[in-house]
Image: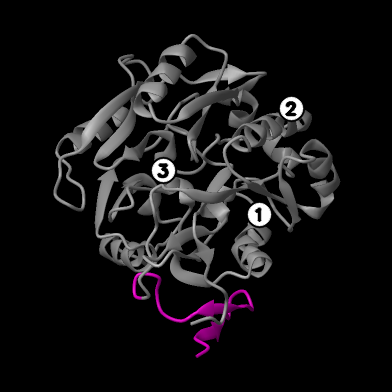
């Protein structure tokens, strides 16, 4: 029986009910993937005179991920020719209108069922609290639902994928600075947000950190400071430099984890990784960091910045992901736009797409 409704906001059918109610939940990033989504850079304002360099950096990240899994690259029609020429034979390019190129935040989040079905969740996107145009980006999940012919659920709140990390066992990690920010969901309480996360992603426990990086346009996304790297294990950024503007917030985040438990009541194993000081790159401020990496099938694509801190951080990642090949890409120019490798990617879990109108 058809079980869909007319989406008043975006004009396309969305599934009735919730993913959790239909037996779906968000798997961990280390679970098997059927592919990866990336958006190609299109906003010249974002990269402020470094557009060619940004395209090269995106292509390098895409090429590294392609060693491990298939890629679908969303490209604004204005940049499709450049994307196709840059990525020939490496990825499938999908012409879809965009405002910017951070698919983790404006794109869909995928959920799976015990039967191996894959469906997408469409959270609202408002340009990180209306900081820039977002109407085209907000429409990307609907366009991809049409492209892949996959069921799309609508979640009744604004949420960016970079603001969360999950363990695939019911636990979600986030920051109060972002999810409780009045520029996202001013009418929702902490309890409302936790309920929405349960309904949309199958979450039964939320671990609340305090803040992300200082002066972050995303208002403190967790994927800059901490992430689940295995069941009951969290990789967290820290620094011993008390003059670092992030020193106190990173210290508080770690202290919160020391007393946290996951959805199964287990204590969290905390794995520390160095957080370099903020600096400039080609005249632009950046905050280098190594949490913002991508876990691919049998691999990890990690950032580097041409600084001394790169080598020990990559060694830490190789120790954490001992069963995966860790490759690194210099993403300094991507950081000038405000994000990293995790920000420009979104995993598609392994399984068969639940086709629209199937239920």
Residue at the spot of label 2: 53
Of badges 1 and 2, nearer the viewer stands 2
Could you give the CA–CA distance between mark 1 and mark 2, rounded to whole angstroms? Answer: 23 Å
Residue with the mark numbered 3 = 30
Query: Mark 1 near mark 3, Cβ–Cβ under 8 Å?
Result: no
179 within the magenta span: no
Residue at mark 1: 133
In this view, the mark in front (2 or 3): 3
The secondary element bearing badge 3 is classed as: loop
The answer to whether residue 33 is left or right of residue 234 is right
Where residue 93 sits: x, y (%)? 75, 50
SS class of the residue under badge 2?
Answer: helix
Q: Does the image show residue 220?
A: no
Q: Which residue is at 34% across, 75% downward?
A: 21
Q: Main secondary structure of the magenta part?
A: loop
**Magenta-drawn segment:** 1-21
Residue 306: image location, x then y, percent: 57, 13
Q: Residue at x 62, y 78 (%)?
A: 12
Q: How is the image coloured?
A: one colour
Q: Tell me: residue 21, above or below residue 166.
A: below
**Residue at horizontal 57 percent and vertical 44 percent from the top:** 345
Numbered disc in front, either 1 or 3: 3
Is residue 197 shown left or right of residue 79?
left
**Which of disc 2 and disc 1 is earlier in sequence?**
2
């Amino acid at each position: 029986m058809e079980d869909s409704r007319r989406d008043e906001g975006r004009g396309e059918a969305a599934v009735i009910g919730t993913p959790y109610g239909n037996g779906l939940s968000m798997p961990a990033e280390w679970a098997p993937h059927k592919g990866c989504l990336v958006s190609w850079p299109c906003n010249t304002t974002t990269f402020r005179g470094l557009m060619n360099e940004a395209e090269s950096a995106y292509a390098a990240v895409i090429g590294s991920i392609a060693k491990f899994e298939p890629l679908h690259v969303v490209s604004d029609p204005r940049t499709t020719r450049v994307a196709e020429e840059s990525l020939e034979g490496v990825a499938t390019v999908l012409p879809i209108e965009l405002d910017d190129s951070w698919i983790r935040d404006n794109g869909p989040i995928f959920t799976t069922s015990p039967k191996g079905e894959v469906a997408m969740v469409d959270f609202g996107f408002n340009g990180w609290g209306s900081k820039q145009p977002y109407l085209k980006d907000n429409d990307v999940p609907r366009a991809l639902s049409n492209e892949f012919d996959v069921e799309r659920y609508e979640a009744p709140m604004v949420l960016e994928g970079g603001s969360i990390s999950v363990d695939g066992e019911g636990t979600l990690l986030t920051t109060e600075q972002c999810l409780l920010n009045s520029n996202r969901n001013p009418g929702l309480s902490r309890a409302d947000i936790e309920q929405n996360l349960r309904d949309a992603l199958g979450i039964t426990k939320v671990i609340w950190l305090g803040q992300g990086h200082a002066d972050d346009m995303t208002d403190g996304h967790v994927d800059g400071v901490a992430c689940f790297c295995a069941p009951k294990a969290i990789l967290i950024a820290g620094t011993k430099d008390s003059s670092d503007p992030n020193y106190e917030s990173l210290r508080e985040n770690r202290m919160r984890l020391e007393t946290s438990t996951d959805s199964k009541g287990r204590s969290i194993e905390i794995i520390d990784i160095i957080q370099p000081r903020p600096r400039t790159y080609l005249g632009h401020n950046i905050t280098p960091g190594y949490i913002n990496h991508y876990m691919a099938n049998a691999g990890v694509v990690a950032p580097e910045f041409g600084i001394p801190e790169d080598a020990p951080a990559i060694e830490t990642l190789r120790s954490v992901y001992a069963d995966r090949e860790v490759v690194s890409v210099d993403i300094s120019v991507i950081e000038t736009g405000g994000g990293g490798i995790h920000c420009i990617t979104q995993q598609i879990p392994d399984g068969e797409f639940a086709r629209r109108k199937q239920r």
